[in-house]
Amino acid sequence: MYCATCDSDEQHRPLTADEKTWLRARTGRRSVDEFFVCKVPDCRNVRSGFNKHPFAPVIRVPLPD
Ligand SMILES: [Zn+2]
């Protein structure tokens, strides 16, 4: 899938349970199942399956502690 912040096609993964909890709180959305995270280590940009740039400014998943 295309990553808008990498400006290239990159591997994405579904969010983990902890990341979904975080993103729900971050966005106020009830469901965040449609979102994916860019697997590039320094990127971690969130996109949905349909929308390469759903958030402005972009949302990046924080690194786990
Ligand atoms: Zn990326």
Image (cartoon, helix red, strand yellow):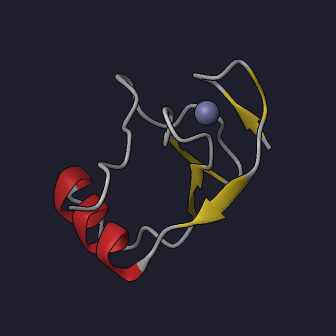
Specify the quadrant of the image occupied by residue 13. Answer: bottom right
Specify the quadrant of the image occupied by residue 52. Answer: top right
Residue at left offset 26%, top offset 73%: 21
3 sits to left or right of 32: right
Q: Nearer the viewer, residue 30 or 43?
A: 43
Residue at left offset 34%, top offset 67%: 19
Residue 62 x %, y %:
29, 48
Specify the quadrant of the image occupied by residue 18. Answer: bottom left
Residue located farthest toward the bottom when viewing the structure as drawn: 17
Q: Is residue 60 above or below residue 15?
A: above
17 sits to left or right of 13: left
8 sits to left or right of 14: right
Q: Is residue 32 above or below residue 2?
A: below
Residue at left offset 71%, top offset 18%: 7
Figure quarter occupied by ligand 1: top right
Residue 25 x %, y %:
17, 62
Q: Nearer the viewer, residue 65 or 49?
A: 65
Residue 55 x %, y %:
42, 33
55 sits to left or right of 23: right
Q: Is residue 11 above or below residue 7?
A: below
**Is the N terminus in the top left, top right, bottom left or bottom right quadrant?**
top right
**Is the C terminus in the top left, top right, bottom left or bottom right quadrant?**
bottom left
Residue at left offset 48%, top offset 33%: 42
